[in-house]
Image: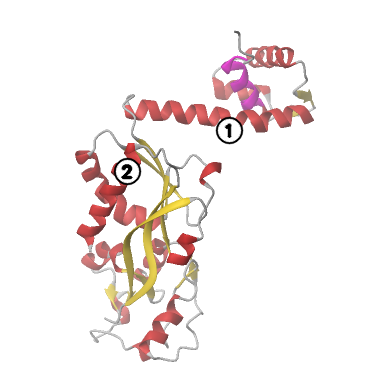
C-alpha cells in the first residue's frame, strides 16, 4: 500500500524556506538552485492540495495552513535527523542514551568518568544536554536526567523513578587574596565580606550562617550566578566568597585558584539523582548506566 508521504527533499526545502522566508537562502543552505527549491515546494503543494507560501516583496511568507504544517513537520524532521545521528554514532550497535544533566555536575563529575564507562560498556553512547529543572519526559527525547534536588522535589517529579547517587556537601571558598596572612576566615568575618549568590540556591548562604550560629544581614545580598562553575570562577577572580559543593571544585583547589575560606561545611538535604521515566520495559542500556553511576558515586564518597 502506497503511503501518503511526500519526498524528504521536498520537506527539507519547505522547512528551510519557511525558516529563512526565502527560496534563495534555502537553496544556499541545501546546496541547490533557487529553481530547484521552488520546484520541490510546488510539487509538495500539489501533493498536499494546499498553498504553503505566499510571495512578498522581500521573499515568501507561510500561509496559515503552511504554518500549521511546519509546526507538525519540523519535530518529525528533527527526530529523523536525531535517529540518523544516533545510528551513525553507535555504528548500529544501539545503546544510545540521551541524558539531561545539571551542567556543572556533568562537566566536573560525570564527563571525567565517561572514559571508564566506555571501557566497561563500549556499546553505550551518552549524549548530554543541560537541564536544571524537572520536565516532562514524554515531551522530550531524553531517556534520563541527572538532577540535583531535595527528596521532596524528586518525589514530586511525576511519572519518574529516582535513584539517589550521592549527597551534597558545600563549603565556602574564595580567592587566596581574601585570606591575606590568615589561614582561614571566621564565620563572623565572612558575614562582612562580599557573598556570591547561586540563583538556583537562593537560601544557601543564610542556611550556612544559621548553622554557624552567626547573624548575617547580607546573607541574601550579592551578585547572582546560575551555574556553580560561574560562581566558582567569580570567586577565583576575587569578586567574593562562594558556597559550592566541594566535589565540583577539586581542580581549582588543587591549582590554588580557590581555597577553603572556613572549614565549616554544610551537608544539606540536596543530593544528586538519576531520574528516569517510570516504565515496565526499561532498556538494558539504561539499567546498565544506572548500575555504573551508582558504583561511580560510591567510589567518589
Colour scheme shown: secondary structure
Q: What's the distance in space between the residues labelled 1 and 2, CA to CA?
A: 28 Å
User: Residue reaching furthest top?
Assistant: 1
Q: Residue at x 37, y 57 (%)?
A: 273
Viewer-proximal residue among 102 and 221 = 102
For numbered disc 2, what is the local secondary structure? Answer: helix
Q: Residue at x 32, y 80 (%)?
A: 178
In this picture, residue 137 sits left or right of residue 162: right
Among the 4 quarters of the image, the one containing residue 204: bottom left
Q: Residue at x 50, y 50 (%)?
A: 159
Taking the magenta stretch, the answer to whether it contains residue 30 is no
Query: Split into 4 quadrants, where in the image is the N terminus?
Result: top right
Q: Earlier in the sequence, mark 1 or mark 2?
A: 1
- The residue indicated by pointer 2 is 287
- The residue indicated by pointer 1 is 75
The percent position of residue 197, horizontal first and vertical second, equals 46, 73
Mark 1 burial class by Cα count in 10 Å: few <14, some 14-19, many 20+:
few
Vertical side of 290 occupied by 83: above or below: above
Marks counted in the figure total 2
Q: Is residue 88 visible?
A: yes
For numbered disc 1, what is the local secondary structure? Answer: helix
Query: Split into 4 quadrants, where in the image is the C terminus?
Result: bottom left
The percent position of residue 268, horizontal first and vertical second, equals 37, 74
Q: Residue at x 63, y 26 (%)?
A: 15
The percent position of residue 209, horizontal first and vertical second, equals 40, 85
The stretch of residues the image draws in magenta is 6-17
Viewer-proximal residue among 300 and 36 = 300
Amino acid at each position: 500500500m502506497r503511503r501518503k508521504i511526500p519526498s524528504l527533499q521536498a520537506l527539507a526545502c519547505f522547512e528551510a524556506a519557511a525558516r529563512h522566508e526565502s527560496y534563495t537562502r534555502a537553496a544556499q543552505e541545501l546546496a541547490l538552485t533557487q529553481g530547484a527549491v521552488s520546484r520541490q515546494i510546488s510539487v509538495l503543494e500539489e501533493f498536499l492540495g494546499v498553498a504553503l507560501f505566499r510571495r512578498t516583496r522581500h521573499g515568501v511568507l507561510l500561509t496559515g495552513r503552511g504554518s500549521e504544517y511546519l509546526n507538525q513537520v519540523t519535530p518529525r524532521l528533527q527526530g529523523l535527523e536525531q535517529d540518523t545521528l544516533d545510528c551513525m554514532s553507535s555504528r548500529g550497535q544501539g545503546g544510545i542514551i540521551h541524558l539531561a544533566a545539571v551542567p556543572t555536575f556533568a562537566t566536573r563529575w560525570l564527563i571525567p568518568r565517561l572514559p571508564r564507562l566506555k571501557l566497561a560498556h563500549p556499546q553505550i553512547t551518552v549524549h548530554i544536554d543541560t537541564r536544571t529543572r524537572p520536565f516532562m519526559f514524554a515531551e522530550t527525547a531524553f531517556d534520563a536526567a541527572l538532577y540535583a534536588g531535595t527528596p521532596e522535589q524528586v518525589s514530586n517529579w511525576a511519572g519518574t523513578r529516582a535513584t539517589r547517587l550521592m549527597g551534597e556537601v558545600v563549603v565556602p571558598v574564595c580567592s587566596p587574596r581574601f585570606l591575606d596572612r590568615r589561614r582561614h576566615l571566621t564565620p563572623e568575618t565572612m558575614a562582612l565580606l562580599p557573598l556570591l549568590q547561586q540563583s538556583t540556591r537562593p537560601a544557601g548562604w543564610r542556611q550556612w550562617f544559621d548553622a554557624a550560629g552567626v547573624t548575617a544581614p547580607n546573607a541574601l545580598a550579592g551578585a547572582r550566578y546560575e551555574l556553580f562553575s560561574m560562581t566558582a570562577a567569580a570567586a577565583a577572580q576575587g569578586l567574593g566568597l562562594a558556597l559550592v559543593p566541594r566535589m565540583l571544585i577539586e581542580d581549582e583547589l588543587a591549582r590554588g585558584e580557590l581555597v577553603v575560606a572556613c572549614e565549616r561545611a554544610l551537608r544539606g538535604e540536596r543530593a544528586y539523582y538519576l531520574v528516569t521515566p517510570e516504565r515496565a520495559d526499561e532498556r538494558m542500556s539504561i539499567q546498565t548506566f544506572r548500575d555504573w553511576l551508582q558504583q561511580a558515586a560510591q567510589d567518589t564518597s
